[in-house]
Amino acid sequence: MNINSMSNISDTIKEYRESLPKDVCLIAVSKTKPNEDILEAYHAGQRIFGENKIQEMTDKHEALPKDIEWHMIGHVQTNKVKYMAPYVSLIHAVHKMKLLKEIEKRAKEENRVIECLLQIKIAEEDSKYGMEADEALKILNSDAYQQMENVKIVGLMGMATLTEDKQKITSEFAYLKEKMDEFSKDFPQLTTLSMGMSGDYQLAIDNGSNMVRIGSSIFGKRNYN
Ligand SMILES: *Cc1c(COP(=O)(O)O)cnc(C)c1O
């Protein structure tokens, strides 16, 4: 697929929606982007958006159509879970048990079940959050998790090393897919494998991803100033 980086948001959304395999879910990553951009994607049919800051996501949730599903794709600080607990639809990057316990507590207060993914560290960079696969398995098997009624772990998430080395990216994605297949034998509720961004989503899909998080190729480069 050749997504033209010069085309507008609406056309790009349509191109993705037409060309991605049917079982691959597209998350439009709208972090730092204004509500008008999100609405343009919305009017092209997109309903799932990803953000990495809870405050920003909450402001957007309040301002925008209520049938949008908001995914928290970024690192979550435990003390901020309460702000998104009323509405968040999937938390991608659960990196420790303590966070899961807080999500359980806040979801219970809201009378909701919040779906989560465990973030597995697959890249070699130290800066990337995530747990080792063994740790994820420990959480899934723990009494503490098994007793949770308001949190449901539905899959795994990972971010590959930022590199041009396709073989390296491929082996990192393949490793996560292997873990997914291994874990889901005992935990069949694990069905979502969130991996792939603008630069590497095709490799991710080739290696078993069924949820891609695409930002800059839809909305253009982000400006953090
Ligand atoms: C920003 C971000 C993305 C999207 O990245 P692009 O390269 O702009 O597609 C995907 N996943 C996570 C976790 C992100 O923080």
Image: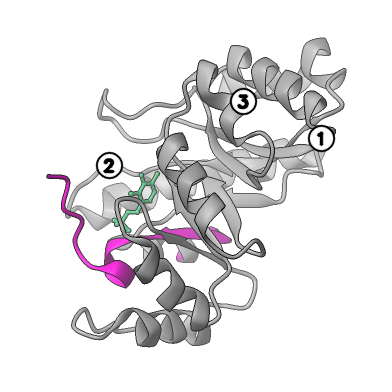
- Residue bearing mark 1: 186
Which quadrant: the N terminus?
bottom left
The three-letter amino acid code for the residue at tag 3 is Lys
The three-letter amino acid code for the residue at tag 1 is Asp
Which quadrant: the C terminus?
top left
Q: As displayed, is residue 24 above or below residue 147?
A: below
C-alpha distance separating marks 2 and 1: 29 Å
**Quadrant position of residue 75:** top left
- Residue bearing mark 3: 82
- Mark 2 or mark 1, whichever is nearer to me: 2
Is the residue under label 1 in contact with that under label 3 (CB below 8 Å)?
Answer: no
* Earlier sequence position, callout 2 versus callout 3: 3
On the rendered structure, is 36 left or right of 72? left
Is the residue under label 3 in contact with that under label 2 (CB below 8 Å)?
Answer: no
Residue 209 highlighted magenta (yes or no): yes
Residue stretch in magenta: 206-225
C-alpha distance separating marks 2 and 3: 31 Å
- Residue bearing mark 2: 161
Report helix, strand or loop for mark 2. Answer: loop
